[in-house]
Image: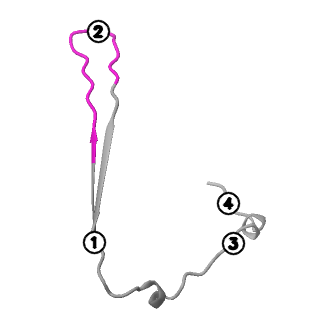
């Protein structure tokens, strides 16, 4: 990891976050359930020096209350 120089820092911009009261909307609680499934299968049986390739399927479900 390289060290930052003053010239590197001069090119950066910062922005302050609003106060915590501004970020707090109405006191309601939001819950999100996330379920992710990855499925893949590759079979290489009964052969020597061969390759088996597999394509992966992905499913992501998000429910919010």
For marks 1 and 3, the one nearer the N-term is 3
* Label 3 environment density (alpha carbons within 10 Å; few <14, some 14–19, many ≥20): few
Q: Main secondary structure of the magenta part?
A: loop
Q: Mark 3 and mark 2 in contact (Cβ < 8 Å)?
A: no
Which numbered disc, 4 or 3, marks the residue that appears first in the sequence? Answer: 4
Q: What is the secondary structure assignment of the residue under circle 3?
A: loop
Asked if 23 appears above or below 55 in the picture, the reply is: below
Mark 2 element type: loop
Q: Which structural element holds mark 1?
A: loop
Q: Which residues are magenta?
A: 37-53
Image coordinates for residue 22, horizontal then vertical, percent: 48, 88
Query: What label sits on residue 48 in the rendered view?
Result: 2
Q: Quadrant of residue 12?
A: bottom right
Q: Are marks 1 and 2 in contact (CB under 8 Å)?
A: no
* Circle nearer the viewer, 1 or 2: 1
Secondary structure beneath dot 4 equals loop
What is the C-alpha distance between the residues marked 1 and 4?
40 Å
Name the quarter where the C terminus is drawn.
bottom left
Q: Is residue 30 magenta?
A: no
Q: Which is nearer the N-term, disc 1 or disc 4? A: 4
- How far apart are labels 1 and 2 at the CA level? 51 Å
Position of residue 47 in the picture relative to residue 18 (left or right)? left
- Of all residues shown, which one is farthest toward the left? 46
Q: Name the residue tied to disc 4.
A: 3
Q: Which residue is mark 1?
A: 31
The residue positioned 32% from the left and 19% from the top of the image is: 52
Is disc 2 surrounded by few (<14), some (14 to 19) or many (20+) residues within 10 Å?
A: few
**Badge number at residue 13:** 3
């Amino acid at each position: 990891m390289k060290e930052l120089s003053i010239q590197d820092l001069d090119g950066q911009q910062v922005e302050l976050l609003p106060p915590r009261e501004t970020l707090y909307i109405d006191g309601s609680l939001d819950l999100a359930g996330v379920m992710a499934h990855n499925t893949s299968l590759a079979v290489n049986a009964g052969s020597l020096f061969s390759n088996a390739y597999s394509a992966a399927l992905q499913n992501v479900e998000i429910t919010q209350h």
